[in-house]
Image (tube, rainbow, N blue to C red):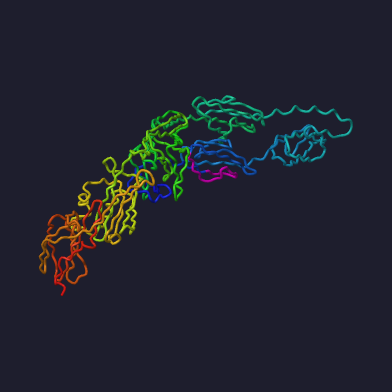
Amino acid sequence: VKLYTEAKLGDADFNSYARAYTKAKVTLEVEYPDVVVLEVEGSGSTSPAPGTYEVWESSFSASASPAAGWVFKYWLLDGSVYSTNPSINPDITKDTVLTAVFEEQQPQKFRLTISVQGQGSTSPPPGTYSYVEGSEVTVSASPAEGWKFSYWLLDGVKKTGNPITVTMNKDHTLVAVFEESGGGESPPPNPPPPPPQPKKYKLSIRVQGQGSTSPSPGTHYYDAGTVVSVKAYPSKGWRFKYWLLDGSVKLSNPIEVTMNKDHVLTAVFEKIPQTKTTYIKVDKISVEVYGCWWSNSSVYTDTPNLLVVQEHFVAKVTVEASEYTITGGPGGIKAAQLTLTVLDKNWFMYSHWNGTLPEFSNKTYTVKLTINKKGKYEYWLPLPDKDTFKSVLVGVYKFDVNYQWTNTRDTGSGTTSCTVKVLGDSGDDDPDVEMHAVFYWLPLDTESGIAVVFYNSSGGLLRQRTWIHGELVVRWRGEVKKVIRLKGGLWSEVLSYFKRCPITGEKDLWCFYQIEKALGFTPPSDAAVSWAEVNLWEIEGPGLNSTFEYRCVAPKQYESLSIEYREATVVVYSLTWTNTTVSGQLKLVDWAEVKPLEGFIVLLTKNGSASQIDYSVLVAKPYTAFSVKVKYPYEVWAIALPWGKNTIYGNRKYGRILLVKNPPEP
């Protein structure tokens, strides 16, 4: 992708800094979150509340709380039973649906065992019955012929009422006692019959998958009402999944089975899947420092590790990362978490853009990054954009970046450095940087031109630098007539102005290929320039002179370049005309010195009664011949458009010549 940012750099007078235009390619790594959908089945609540959540790390915590009269049963993860623990912390490696399942709480039940002593019957008949807690059970006794009801024994306590009402607040034993009826001495009571043998039920324990149980798999018999605890033990490489009790899923392990009937209990085991985990590992980190600035939402950088004092700069940290995969672990990709720290040094400051002006401070700068894929990455520090560092001392220094990284399995740390040379005036007679400026006047049309200044040092054009700016001060008889602030930018930006030049002709003579001839060289598109569009009427006048003042190296260090303002004219060597053609020979010269100049001569022709003026452009050279078609009546003018080096050429006084008017003025 292409990343563009914008800022104005400098000290308090940030508008004085240059701005330029180019492109910077930045590679971005984008990490997407996993989505967890939290749901509830039954009556209860969860924390966090049911809804959709983005998970950036692999861990997600949730807990379930049942409503009154309900109990928590288990969690479902993507439709499969996950855990019976109300609080869970599953690893999230993909989009997931978590469902908390609640079920209504079953009421407590107690057993009532009814028996008979003597001869008689009860309603309900003797036997064992289960009733909900708090139930009131009415039991009546009916004696056999020749017998009579005597009393009840409720849990061994004598009760006389018949029928009797028993409140089921625990397990109870109720015995109806009958005795023989008739006169005389009663025979001794028959001894009570032995208590009935308890009924036995069958528990069949089975295993599905690889594992064992305690008690071991097989068929076991238990008295009615016995509560049997059974525990499952998975084999190596397997894990317990759930119980099937008479076909119903149960999750608790161990499980308790009440023997109120025959039961079939199956321990279900599943094989633990062999996960694969990919770890991202940081192999190499390097750093370079670049002078920089922002313009039109684009960031520009210059020669690495070379700065000028008071220049804003950024650090490019290059990270090379690899990956390896193991069998096991949590699964998925474990990114490398990288921390970069730039320690505070005395040779530079941290510059934070507050939206209006930069704020400077001495501080340690730290940033945390995530690398979730192998490859080579470039990170520009500081982040966010528009913040920078700023050099404040001249000399050769180390720029250090401390780093630490971890992928939960491996770690690494160290320091990466680069040597930075900061140029500038060190206070002696031999400054470290000598910058030179060359001024050019390039006509844009008959009324205006471009004042452009190229910068060089050590014989080469400077590229993409931030400290260059200046202004053109025009004076008339010593007084300031006009101050024109020049913009800082790139040569490619100036070229865009000539695309709208009206004096193009059939071959775009001025707009493109002739411009190199005016300069005497082919400038690169990213050469540093200061420039402004200047209207001739703003600076015309006798006795004019001007200076171009530009700042270089350090703030408030200005140099002046003397700029002459001169008039140009067109000399006519020969001229002939008819009602259809005007031809002749012309020459572009300096008015005062009468020396030939390079540039263009523009012919303006007004034909007939039409108000439209036609343009034609001549490349100025000795005895420039021309011939133009005309339509009677007509006027033909010649306008001087020379280019100049350290000179501005005007044409408003002597450079606009009426060649012919046909018919002439009376």
The answer to whether 292 appears left or right of 355 in the picture is left
Main secondary-structure element of the magenta-colored stretch: strand
Q: Residue at x 53, y 28 (%)?
A: 207
Q: Nearer the viewer, residue 576 or 64?
A: 576
From the top left corner, tell me how far across and down residue 487 is, in percent.
33, 52
The answer to whether 225 appears left or right of 301 in the picture is right
Query: Which contiguous range is marked in magenta?
Result: 38-56
In this picture, is 531 found above or below 147? below
Furthest residue toward bottom: 666
Q: Is residue 332 visible?
A: no
The answer to whether 639 appears left or right of 3 in the picture is left
Q: Quadrant of residue 106?
A: top right
From the top left corner, tell me how far across and down residue 197 is, in percent.
70, 27
Q: Nearer the viewer, residue 408 or 16?
A: 16
Which quadrant holds the C terminus? bottom left
In this picture, is 471 found above or below 156? below
In this picture, is 375 found above or below 465? above
Q: Quadrant of residue 589?
A: bottom left
From the top left corner, tell me how far across and down residue 225 is, in percent.
67, 31
In this picture, is 343 found above or below 212? below
Furthest residue toward front: 477
Q: Is residue 523 magenta?
A: no
Q: Nearer the viewer, residue 281 or 311?
A: 311
Q: Is residue 494 visible?
A: yes
Which quadrant holds the N terminus? top left
